[in-house]
Image: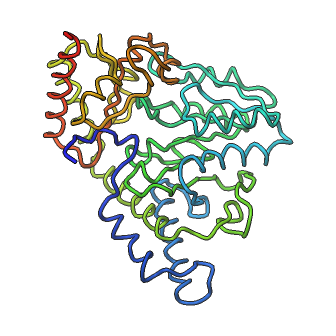
Amino acid sequence: MNSVYLDYNATTPVDPAVVDELLPFLTTHFGNPSSNHPYGKAGKEAVELARGRVAAALGCTPGEVIFTSGGTESDNQALIGTAFANRERGNHIITSAVEHPAVLKPLSWLEEQGFAVSCLPVDGAGMVDPDEVRKAITGRTILVSIMHANNEVGSIQPLAEISAITRARGILLHSDAAQSVGKIPTLVDQLGVDLLTVAGHKLYAPKGIGALYIRKGVRVAPYLHGAGHEGGLRAGTENVPYMAALGKAMELAAERIAAGEPGQVEALRDRLHAQLQELAGGVVLNGAEKERLPNTLNVSFEGVVGADLLARLPEIAASTGSACHDGKGELSGVLKAMGLSRAQGFGAVRLSLGRLTTAQDVDRAAALIAAKVKEIRIS
């Protein structure tokens, strides 16, 4: 495929080093980690090595990490498991209007089970005000779930400030960090979170693997019931190859962050933004200007519908959060919560860069997008 890939927030390619890590566990080391023979022991050792690598990248202990099938399961485990395990303390949960459906949908289901959910507004940059969290807390509040970084506009939430509020009240804090892990430092003690979601395919591991950090002492009910895998919290024979892959991907991510990869990607993102402004004009940034993922550029092109633009640009692989054609359709829930007008919201395009993006990719994408924007505007 000859298109420029600018959809890293949707998914990433699997890093070659990650592929090398997982392949032996599809062939030679195929044993069940629960088996007490050399094949099984090799599998168990691989799982615990991977768990240690994930823990090291998050700044926690291996015993605080469980493996899941991905971000959606991790979110469901965190929210539903925590809600039911702590129900005698209360039934109130706080979240934000810009969360991923993997958070909002299970919370909607919990409402059907008798829990109360407060959904906080955000400002024009997609940011939650910590004071709004403080005001929403009641004597029945048991959990707050605020994402670390937004998948559409990249805005990074003030989790450390929010955690100071929740900890003072003895309330648990969960964060969906699917978009931030691997892109920026996500050390659980610095963030102050009690539970944190990791999605493998967002950080150069395969689809179908994820992890959930659960701070020691936090009560969480099992989500999948069966044998006592993952400390009794997540039953099912371990997916050894993908666990090994996630561990390697987390190790690589920590190394690359320390080596300055976020700054390199941010420079390319800003180069793309500057060229679009120069070549196309009428470009409006959506989301926070500074407190934003280094790889994410969400912009609206005046007089252009984002979905139509991408449909006419097979040379660019990117996304738009709003389902729209000719101004009709559903505005992205994130952009709507941010207060964007229909015109600006439907004009939005998310361009997300990654490890393999080059300056040549950026220059080609800017030229192609700008030319098509001008063409649409005069048509």
Residue 119 on image: x %, y %: 65, 24
Relative placement, left or right, of 117 versus 283 is right
Q: Give the side of residue 233 with respect to residue 75, left or right.
A: right
* Residue in front for this viewpoint, 211 or 12: 12
* Foreground pick, 179 / 11: 11
The picture quadrant where one finds residue 115 is top right
Q: Quarter of the image holding residue 80?
A: top right
Vertical order, 138 against 167 (above or below):
above
Give how far across and how far down residue 239 sits, in percent.
54, 68
How many marks can you see? Answer: 0
Residue 209 in the image: above or below residue 81 = below
Identified at 56% across, 56% down, the residue is 69
In this rendering, the answer to whether 101 lies above or below 209 is above
Residue furthest to the right: 88
Residue at horizontal 63%, vertical 30%? Answer: 95
| Residue 219 coordinates in the image, percent (x, y) | 74, 51
The residue located at (38%, 20%) in the rendering is 286
Report the quarter where the C terminus lies. Answer: top left
Q: Position of residue 117 (x, y in %)?
A: 72, 28
Q: How is the image coloured?
A: rainbow
